[in-house]
Amino acid sequence: MHPSWWRRASHRCRCSCPNGTSAELLHRRAGVQVRGPGQLPTSSAHFCYWVWRRRNGPTCCILTLTVLVATSGVLVSTCLPSSPASAARAVRPRISGPYPTWYAPYVDATLPPEYPAADRAENPAGQTVFGFVVASPTLPCTPSWGDYFSLAGIDASALHLGTVIEAMRARGETPIVSFGGQDNQPLADTCTSVAALEHAYAEVVGRYHLAVVDLDIEGAAQGDAAALARQAAALRLLQAQVARDGRTLGVWLTLPVTRQGMLPVTEGVVAAMLDGGVELSGVNLMTMYFGPSPGDGAPMLAAVEAALGASFVQLRRIYSSHGIALDDAEVWQHMGATVQIGQAGVPGQAFTVADAEGLVRFAEAKGLGRVSDWSANQDAPCGSASHPSIGGYSNYCSGVAQAPGEFGRIFSALDGSATDTPLLDPSRR
């Protein structure tokens, strides 16, 4: 690979690297502004490099800034070949920038029939969250899928999860695994040492070649200080190991929320992870099952937006108290919303197609980091599309008027990538 030149010109950055990738377009898409001649901040250069590297794998160009002391004040940089080890050091982002919102439906990985992730027409998202990995009921501190299948067992079953995930990865999509959930025992409960818990997480990350994981922490698990501390320590070790291998591991916390925001115990989960040194991608709020219910026929969108607005204020305060300085746009970028599509399991809460369209507009206006829904298994009308059965909760349909797969198609307008969200570094103090 021959060096090429990168320069600041006409208030935008431009990179011409050997494979023809245009970092100028990526940089302008991110909206980074250069304020004057020769004033391209180092962080902007790192951002251009980071996005370019993530698009092109471990063999890449490192952008090294050089200031030419001259009357023109031009800033230039060389594009140099990089080894995976040096890329790992350079890729650890320390800043945030505006990236397009990404959409990832949740799927119950243990629910037959096999999830059609290999069919892009049925699964238009660029990433999917598979849930849930919990502790095996018979082998302590051993990962299992919903306590129904071992990791090997689900691959050998009719669900063929490993094959599904490999098909996604072959198309350039991002599989995400969610640990925890509402039911069963989380690994953090049964793995009583940090080393054992880190090993359990690493087994799943390595098996599915994950770049992003999701931790669904709810119920009593939110208040278990010892388990949260183990979780944070294990994740910190795992992220460090992944970085030594030349990669990054994004970590999203998925947490319950009320219309008034997160409860104090939920805020404590975020603080515990940051205290433990975890580099979070963000906090994904479960904007569903509100009490009291909005009522039959009342739009759920208003309750979702209220919950996100209140949580925004809380998260900005938590990040600031941990020495992570983010502007408003960056706080939104590190937030997510997960909705229960269709009729929820409680009366008076139905998230409709119109609500989904409104949430897409809200996400685009705020620069929300991610949108997810529970679940892709339910993205179909109950009965026929022309004569749907309205109301009632089912694992296989929504209970609201919709075309098959309509929620997924609406949300897939949010076409960002989960691997583009930079990590929040709690060591920046």
Image (tube, helix red, strand yellow):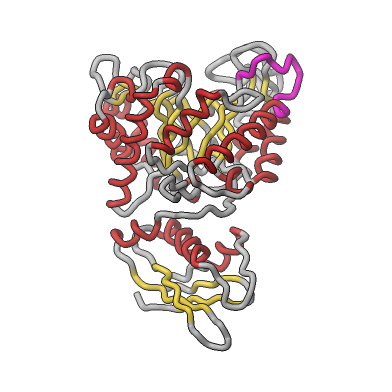
Q: At x 53% / y 53%, what residue is drawn?
A: 96
Q: Nearer the viewer, residue 258 or 338?
A: 258
Q: Nearer the viewer, residue 256 or 80?
A: 256
Horizontal side of residue 90 vs 303, given as left or right: left
Magenta highlight on residue 301: yes
Relative to 390, say whether 240 is above or below.
below
Q: Nearer the viewer, residue 72 or 164?
A: 72
Q: Is residue 390 visible?
A: no
Relative to 62, say whether 129 is above or below.
above
Q: Nearer the viewer, residue 92 or 347?
A: 92
Determine which quarter of the picture holds residue 176: top left
Relative to 78, say whether 153 is above or below.
above
Q: At x 29% / y 28%, what residue is drawn?
A: 151
Q: Which segment did they paint magenta?
A: 289-302
Q: Is residue 344 visible?
A: yes
In percent of width and height, residue 179 lies at: 39, 28
Horizontal side of residue 246 vs 331, given as left or right: left
Locate the N terminus by quadrant.
bottom left
Residue occupying the far bottom of the picture: 71
Determine which quarter of the picture holds residue 383: top right
Magenta highlight on residue 138: no
